[in-house]
Image (cartoon, rainbow, N blue to C red):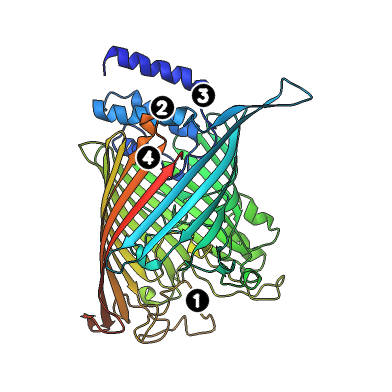
Amino acid sequence: MNILRKFIFVSLMFCSAGLFAQQNLSVPLTDDAYFLLENASLRGILPTLPSAKPYTVSFVLDNLDKVLESDTLSDSERVVFEKTYERLAQNEPKKWYETGYYTNRFDENVKLPVTAGFSWESLASVNFNNPDLSHEHWATGYIKGDITDYFSYNFNIAGSLMDLSNQAFAPNTYLKSWDGFQFILSDFYDYVSISDLPAGGLRMLPELAFSAFDSKVQVKFSRTRRDWGYGAGNLMLSETARPFLAIETALNPIPWFSTNFITGTLEYDSNGNLKETASTFQNMYSALWGELRFKYFYFGGTGSVVFPKRIELGYMNPFMLAFLYQNQIGDFDNMQLGLFTGVTIPGITHIYTSIFMDELNVQTSHFLNKDRNMYAVQLGAKSPLPWWSSVLTLQYTKIEPYMYTHPLTKTPWYDKPMDTTYINHGQPLGYFLNPNSDEFKLQLQAKPLWYLSTNASYTLVRHGATSGSGKVDGSSFSDSLNYSGNLQDAQEGDLYWKDFLHDGVYEWINSVALGAVLDCRYWDIPITVGLTYTFSYTHHTLGNKDGYYRIDNAEYSNKAGNYLTLSLKLYQ
């Protein structure tokens, strides 16, 4: 980069200090900035960053600035990082925004910054093998701003029109986008899942955010998607989980240590009778996350709890270990523990492992075959490639039967047994796979141009059948253990004995996906356009203690799908 260009960019950074838009608010998890920061960390340009996301705007800008101070970027890569910095560092876009100050009528010196805006999102998908078009459209209005350098706010509300079908989306790819329930336009009937009739929906993602001491202390009261961990999708809190309203704190007092704590309210999944569904799902959620990040090694741990709504101070204190505290108050709640480790070879790879546990009895014989041992494991490696800004990910994830589910629990303060599953609005808080599944993932992400993001992936998901003659128990979120059953002493062939791939029918879902996103905001055209093609092929196997073999019959038939998904975001 020549001297003049460097001077212009440095000047921009200084001049834009007063233009930072809502610097304490979260950067959406879909923003390319996360990928760029991960790439820089893997290459050793940045240290290992906190694994609890989303990050604030100011945190992202500070780290992009550190990358740009490095001499290891190629000219093309430097443009990518510069353009991302510029986009986040200023109010964008200008044309449809009204930016100004609300003045207090009693004191003209007290002013409230206000930025009002509007955005539009559309998503359409089709399966050419089973012609069926799905589409949804969201209009969002918002008001946000900074009140001093320490506090930011964002109020928003969105409405949608949609006409959706499960057949139109590649397996394990569609995520709910509405809050509460859909309402059918013809009779406003609420739905539990995707409707095949035209419907509407609402969504609110508000955020109040406080940050101080160069982002070393953060407090948020928000409803947003979160992602805690280093995997491509995580076991504890995954970016695929539905958002929920929560108060969360983050402390990063020294560069190699950070801790996060969250307490929030989980949301039920409507089954057509709102009050009846909600009456057994009235849950709170608390989780503590701590991590040590050294140059070559990473260690993390977590404890979380799903508990029926009540004022329970022990679950709201970040220094109280919930899994020990529950025994002091009666053991009515669903507890989880997680351990995470990683090894980094800067410039070459980052290897990570995770285990997230719901219930374990390490004294049981045949530990791996007892359904009562419910856990999820993940191991993978992420490596930067020598060309462009690119990252190659190889990852394996295993979700055991009955994981994320929990039996109905009798509690003294409700007249009905309560459902304390590790689920929010019908979807797991953790990895987006059904119980009794595993997944092999190979993924390549790259940003070859500052306006273009690309990705390619291959996944193999194996999952126990949830219905039919070959149904495998514990393969659905509607399955839960019966604690009066034969859990401890289950033998081969019993209900609560598991043997992956050998205890019934399993579907094998092979998927290849290619996608790209064109970001026109860099040309002052506030539009992003995404296109993804996915080919998927599913076959089935029937297994027993002697092995498994492929089957193809009327009940479990092979099927192929060719899916095309188009997304459009206007003034995002």
Disc 4/disc 1 C-alpha distance (Å): 39 Å
Given contact means CB atoms under 8 Å apart, are the residues at marks 2 and 3 in contact? no
* Residue reaching furthest to the right: 106
Q: Residue 86 carries which label?
A: 2
Q: How crowded is mark 3: few (under 14 residues within 10 Å), some or many (20 or more)?
A: some
Indicate the secondary structure of the residue bearing disc 1.
Answer: loop
Q: Distance between the residues labelled 2 and 3?
A: 11 Å
Given residues 337 and 475, the one toward you in this image is 475
Cα distance in 3D space between marks 1 and 3: 52 Å
Work out which quarter of the rendered image holds the N terminus and state it: top left
User: Would residue 471 be found to the left or right of residue 16 on screen?
Assistant: left
Labelled disc at residue 32: 4
From the top left corner, tell me how far across and down residue 353 is, in percent. Answer: 35, 54
Precedes in sequence: disc 2 or disc 3: 3
The percent position of residue 114, horizontal first and vertical second, equals: 61, 31
Q: Of the numbered discs in the image, which one, if any, rests on residue 455?
A: none
For marks 1 and 2, give the one nearer the viewer. 2
Give the mark nearest the N terminus, 4 or 1: 4
Q: Which residue lies furthest to the front in this view?
A: 186
Q: Residues within 10 Å of mark 2 (few under 14, many from 20)?
A: some
How far apart in space, not on screen, are marks 1 and 2 (Cα)?
Answer: 50 Å
Which amino acid lies under the numbered mark 3 shown in the image of this protein?
Answer: Leu
Disc 3: which residue: 19
Determine whether the residue tagged by mark 4 lies in a helix, strand or loop. helix
Label 3, label 4: how far apart the Cα atoms are: 21 Å
Q: Earlier in the sequence, mark 1 or mark 3?
A: 3
Residue at 27% over, 28% down: 73
Whether the residues at callouts 1 and 3 have beta carbons within 8 Å, the answer is no
Q: Distance between the residues labelled 4 and 2?
A: 13 Å
Q: Do the residues labelled 4 and 2 touch (CB within 8 Å)?
A: no
Kindly identify the amino acid type of the residue bearing the numbered disc 4. Answer: Asp
The residue that mark 1 highlights is 480
